[in-house]
Image (cartoon, grey):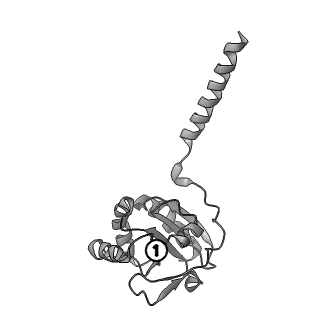
Protein backbone atom coordinates (compact mmCIF):
# COMPACT_ATOMS: atom_id res chain seq x y z
CA UNK A 1 0.00 0.00 0.00
CA UNK A 2 2.84 2.46 0.84
CA UNK A 3 4.67 1.75 -2.45
CA UNK A 4 1.69 3.05 -4.42
CA UNK A 5 1.40 6.17 -2.25
CA UNK A 6 4.83 7.63 -3.10
CA UNK A 7 4.26 7.91 -6.89
CA UNK A 8 0.83 9.40 -6.21
CA UNK A 9 2.36 11.97 -3.86
CA UNK A 10 5.06 12.89 -6.40
CA UNK A 11 2.41 13.23 -9.10
CA UNK A 12 0.36 15.51 -6.83
CA UNK A 13 3.37 17.77 -6.18
CA UNK A 14 4.08 18.02 -9.92
CA UNK A 15 0.46 18.91 -10.65
CA UNK A 16 0.60 21.62 -7.97
CA UNK A 17 3.74 23.14 -9.52
CA UNK A 18 2.13 23.04 -12.97
CA UNK A 19 -1.01 24.74 -11.65
CA UNK A 20 1.05 27.50 -10.04
CA UNK A 21 3.07 27.96 -13.24
CA UNK A 22 -0.08 28.35 -15.32
CA UNK A 23 -1.22 31.27 -13.16
CA UNK A 24 1.99 33.25 -13.77
CA UNK A 25 2.19 35.97 -16.42
CA UNK A 26 5.25 35.33 -18.60
CA UNK A 27 5.25 38.91 -19.94
CA UNK A 28 5.74 40.17 -16.40
CA UNK A 29 9.12 38.62 -15.72
CA UNK A 30 10.63 40.86 -13.06
CA UNK A 31 13.79 42.58 -14.15
CA UNK A 32 16.65 42.80 -11.66
CA UNK A 33 17.34 46.28 -13.10
CA UNK A 34 14.06 47.83 -11.97
CA UNK A 35 14.90 50.74 -9.64
CA UNK A 36 18.57 50.53 -10.66
CA UNK A 37 20.50 52.94 -12.90
CA UNK A 38 20.38 52.26 -16.62
CA UNK A 39 23.74 50.74 -17.63
CA UNK A 40 26.10 53.33 -19.06
CA UNK A 41 26.58 53.07 -22.79
CA UNK A 42 27.60 55.14 -25.77
CA UNK A 43 26.75 53.77 -29.20
CA UNK A 44 26.74 55.10 -32.76
CA UNK A 45 23.47 56.53 -34.02
CA UNK A 46 21.73 54.55 -36.75
CA UNK A 47 21.12 57.57 -38.98
CA UNK A 48 24.43 59.28 -38.22
CA UNK A 49 27.17 56.69 -37.54
CA UNK A 50 29.72 59.43 -36.78
CA UNK A 51 27.60 60.62 -33.85
CA UNK A 52 26.88 58.76 -30.66
CA UNK A 53 23.93 58.31 -28.35
CA UNK A 54 24.66 57.76 -24.67
CA UNK A 55 22.45 57.04 -21.69
CA UNK A 56 24.17 59.95 -19.95
CA UNK A 57 22.73 62.30 -22.63
CA UNK A 58 19.26 61.67 -21.23
CA UNK A 59 19.87 62.73 -17.61
CA UNK A 60 17.14 65.07 -16.44
CA UNK A 61 14.56 63.57 -18.82
CA UNK A 62 11.96 60.82 -18.55
CA UNK A 63 12.36 58.64 -21.62
CA UNK A 64 11.43 55.38 -23.26
CA UNK A 65 14.03 53.03 -24.74
CA UNK A 66 12.61 50.52 -27.21
CA UNK A 67 14.83 47.58 -28.18
CA UNK A 68 14.00 46.52 -31.74
CA UNK A 69 15.36 44.89 -34.91
CA UNK A 70 14.36 44.70 -38.56
CA UNK A 71 14.37 40.88 -38.37
CA UNK A 72 11.94 40.87 -35.42
CA UNK A 73 8.38 39.83 -36.32
CA UNK A 74 6.92 41.08 -33.01
CA UNK A 75 8.58 44.47 -33.59
CA UNK A 76 6.49 44.79 -36.74
CA UNK A 77 3.38 44.19 -34.63
CA UNK A 78 4.20 46.96 -32.14
CA UNK A 79 5.59 49.42 -34.69
CA UNK A 80 2.31 51.13 -35.68
CA UNK A 81 1.64 51.80 -31.98
CA UNK A 82 5.06 53.43 -31.61
CA UNK A 83 4.62 55.48 -34.79
CA UNK A 84 1.30 56.80 -33.46
CA UNK A 85 2.88 57.51 -30.08
CA UNK A 86 5.65 59.49 -31.78
CA UNK A 87 3.08 61.52 -33.77
CA UNK A 88 1.50 62.63 -30.50
CA UNK A 89 4.92 64.02 -29.50
CA UNK A 90 4.42 63.63 -25.74
CA UNK A 91 7.06 60.94 -25.14
CA UNK A 92 10.82 60.96 -25.64
CA UNK A 93 11.09 57.69 -27.57
CA UNK A 94 14.54 56.32 -28.42
CA UNK A 95 15.47 53.07 -30.11
CA UNK A 96 18.15 50.51 -29.52
CA UNK A 97 18.65 48.59 -32.77
CA UNK A 98 19.66 45.15 -31.50
CA UNK A 99 21.93 42.69 -33.35
CA UNK A 100 20.90 44.04 -36.73
CA UNK A 101 22.48 45.16 -39.98
CA UNK A 102 22.33 48.97 -40.15
CA UNK A 103 21.27 48.96 -43.82
CA UNK A 104 18.38 46.60 -43.05
CA UNK A 105 17.35 48.71 -40.06
CA UNK A 106 17.36 51.94 -42.06
CA UNK A 107 15.34 50.35 -44.89
CA UNK A 108 12.86 48.99 -42.35
CA UNK A 109 12.36 52.42 -40.77
CA UNK A 110 12.03 54.04 -44.21
CA UNK A 111 9.34 51.53 -45.13
CA UNK A 112 7.32 51.48 -41.89
CA UNK A 113 8.08 54.91 -40.42
CA UNK A 114 10.61 56.08 -37.88
CA UNK A 115 9.11 56.80 -34.47
CA UNK A 116 12.49 57.29 -32.76
CA UNK A 117 14.13 60.61 -32.00
CA UNK A 118 17.36 58.64 -32.35
CA UNK A 119 18.17 54.97 -32.60
CA UNK A 120 21.47 53.62 -31.30
CA UNK A 121 23.17 50.67 -32.99
CA UNK A 122 23.88 47.72 -30.68
CA UNK A 123 25.33 45.55 -33.44
CA UNK A 124 26.82 42.90 -31.15
CA UNK A 125 24.09 43.03 -28.48
CA UNK A 126 26.44 44.00 -25.64
CA UNK A 127 24.24 46.82 -24.33
CA UNK A 128 21.27 44.48 -24.66
CA UNK A 129 23.09 42.01 -22.42
CA UNK A 130 23.73 44.78 -19.87
CA UNK A 131 20.02 45.63 -19.97
CA UNK A 132 19.03 42.00 -19.47
CA UNK A 133 17.24 41.78 -22.82
CA UNK A 134 15.63 38.37 -23.24
CA UNK A 135 14.53 39.05 -26.81
CA UNK A 136 13.12 41.82 -28.91
CA UNK A 137 11.04 43.84 -28.59
CA UNK A 138 11.55 45.08 -25.06
CA UNK A 139 10.88 48.57 -23.76
CA UNK A 140 12.27 50.40 -20.75
CA UNK A 141 10.98 53.51 -18.97
CA UNK A 142 13.83 55.52 -17.48
CA UNK A 143 13.36 58.42 -15.07
CA UNK A 144 15.14 61.79 -14.80
CA UNK A 145 17.86 60.30 -12.61
CA UNK A 146 18.65 57.57 -15.15
CA UNK A 147 16.89 54.86 -13.15
CA UNK A 148 14.92 52.11 -14.89
CA UNK A 149 11.37 52.19 -13.54
CA UNK A 150 9.59 49.74 -15.86
CA UNK A 151 10.33 47.01 -18.37
CA UNK A 152 7.84 45.79 -20.99
CA UNK A 153 8.71 42.42 -22.44
CA UNK A 154 7.17 41.86 -25.85
CA UNK A 155 5.31 44.28 -28.09
CA UNK A 156 4.04 47.57 -26.73
CA UNK A 157 0.28 47.58 -27.23
CA UNK A 158 -2.19 50.45 -27.05
CA UNK A 159 -3.52 48.85 -23.87
CA UNK A 160 -0.06 48.71 -22.28
CA UNK A 161 0.50 52.36 -23.20
CA UNK A 162 -2.83 53.57 -21.84
CA UNK A 163 -2.93 51.46 -18.68
CA UNK A 164 0.71 51.28 -17.59
CA UNK A 165 3.37 53.10 -19.59
CA UNK A 166 1.90 56.56 -20.13
CA UNK A 167 0.48 56.89 -16.60
CA UNK A 168 3.89 55.92 -15.19
CA UNK A 169 5.69 58.40 -17.43
CA UNK A 170 3.31 61.20 -16.36
CA UNK A 171 3.87 60.26 -12.72
CA UNK A 172 7.63 60.43 -13.27
CA UNK A 173 7.28 63.92 -14.72
CA UNK A 174 7.32 63.37 -18.47
Q: Is residue 21 above or below residue 134?
A: above
Instruction: Locate residue 36 relative to residue 80 in the image: left or right.
Output: right
Q: Can you name the residue that lies furthest to the right here?
A: 2
Label 1 secondary element: loop
Instruction: Residue 82 in the image: state x and y as whole percent.
Output: 38, 69
Question: The N terminus appears in which quarter of the rendering?
Answer: top right
Residue 91 in sight: no
Instruction: Residue 6 in the image: state x and y as whole percent.
Output: 69, 19
Quadrant position of residue 32:
bottom right
The answer to which of 99 and 68 lies nearer the viewer is 99
Q: For the point 53% across and 63% down, which residue is it?
A: 133
Instruction: Residue 65 in the image: state x and y as whole percent.
Output: 50, 72
Q: Can you name the residue that lies furthest to the left here?
A: 111
Q: For the point 52% across and 59% down, which residue is it?
A: 134
* Residue density around tag 1, few if under 14, some if 14–19, many if 20 or more, within 10 Å: some
Instruction: Locate residue 158 relative to residue 24 in the image: left or right.
Output: left
> How many marks do you count on the picture?
1
Q: For the point 64% across and 20% down, which residue is it?
A: 8
Q: Which residue is mark 1?
A: 123
Q: Is residue 20 above or below residue 32?
A: above
Instruction: Locate residue 164 relative to residue 86 in the image: left or right.
Output: right
Instruction: Residue 3 in the image: state x and y as whole percent.
Output: 70, 14
Q: Is residue 5 above or below residue 49?
A: above
The answer to which of 33 and 132 lies nearer the viewer is 132
Q: For the point 51% across and 70% down, which residue is it?
A: 125
Q: Is residue 11 above or below residue 64?
A: above
Q: Can you name the residue that lies furthest to the bottom here?
A: 50
Residue 164 in sight: yes
Quadrant position of residue 38:
bottom right
Amino acid sequence: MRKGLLPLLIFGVLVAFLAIGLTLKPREIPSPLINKPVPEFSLPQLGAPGQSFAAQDMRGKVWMLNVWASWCVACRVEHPVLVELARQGDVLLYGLNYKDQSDNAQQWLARFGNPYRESAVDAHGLVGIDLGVYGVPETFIIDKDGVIRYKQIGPVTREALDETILPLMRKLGA
